[in-house]
Image (cartoon, rainbow, N blue to C red):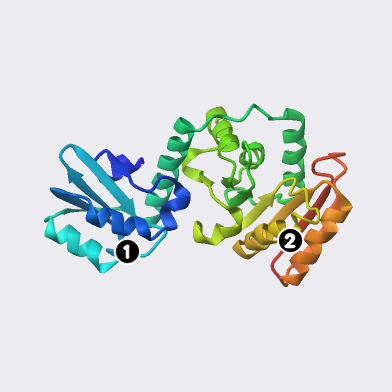
Amino acid sequence: MSIHDIMGINARFIEPSFEALVDQSFTGIVLTLPAEEARLVVDENDWPLALAVRDGQQWSAASFLLRPPVVEVIERYEELDGEVVRTTQDELMLAMREYYSLLLLERTPMAIEDLSPDRTAKVEDLIASVWKDRRGEECMDCGCGSGMGSLALRNRGLVPLAFDNDAGLIARGLYAGRLAPERTMCIDASLLSHYARPAPLGLALMAGSIIDHTALMWKGILEELFAMTEETLVTVETEKEAEAVKMWALGNGKEVELFENERDPFYDRWAILVKDR
């Protein structure tokens, strides 16, 4: 269900991107907009999730899905004798991801097509060998790019939640249908816990390159992914990179299995399976 179907109006969200939904400053902005009418979206526990206000023919909205509302939100709604719309947090999350994914696709120049069917098949086989009986479970696709990993996960019966900070690659994946709008986020992966709930599984294909000046960045990204999942599969190009990932996982109290993936001589040559103890 789209956000417009949930709210019953065609509202424009004032936050410019999904990533901006954590920014408290937009709450103050929506409270200062001139308005004749209001609509408040609440969850099953009556917790405010979004406020929309109408000025003339234009509805403008702000979301509190990823940041706490303030009492002034309720006061503004009551002042305008507004209407309440009920939904669930899960339903609204899907709708907000879809809204911003479609906005990104509309506004962002697409990266060139980079899908390799051969590599996709090899990744799919690797996933099948590691997660034989996990159909129907959610898997975070970290650094999803244009969606090759999500495609492989979906083909194996898993449910990907994809994220990357490269809007052009995401746009390509959305356009090609490899990325589902309602299950895709353009965010900084090192801040994943600000945007999503924990999931059973995680995937980070071809993490890196992990070299001296990028190691700290990748450490932050992967440690966040490890914290948000029970089990994560990471692939890298070199044994040295694999050893670095292994040490980061061990340093976070995880069990680690490192093995050479002979399916791929280059991109995903080394695999690291990281599990909760």
Residue at 46 percent across and 32 percent down: it is: 107
* Residue 141 visible in the shown view: yes
Q: Position of residue 233 (x, y in %)?
A: 72, 53
- Closer to the camera: disc 1 or disc 2? 1
Q: Would residue 166 appear left or right of 65 to someone viewing this image? A: right
Front-most of residues 237 and 124: 237
Q: Which mark is residue 274?
A: 2
Residue 224, horizontal then vertical, whole percent: 63, 62
Q: Position of residue 104 (x, y in %)?
A: 47, 37
Quick one: label 1 or label 2, which is nearer the N terminus? 1
Choose top left, top right, bottom left or bottom right for residue 230.
bottom right
Residue 8 makes an appearance in the image: no
Q: Is residue 191 left or right of residue 217?
A: left
Residue 52: image x %, image y %? 25, 49
Under tag 2, what secondary structure? Answer: strand
Report the residue marked by disc 1.
Answer: 69
- Please determine whether, in this image, residue 111 is positioned above or below residue 204: above
State the mark number for residue 100: none
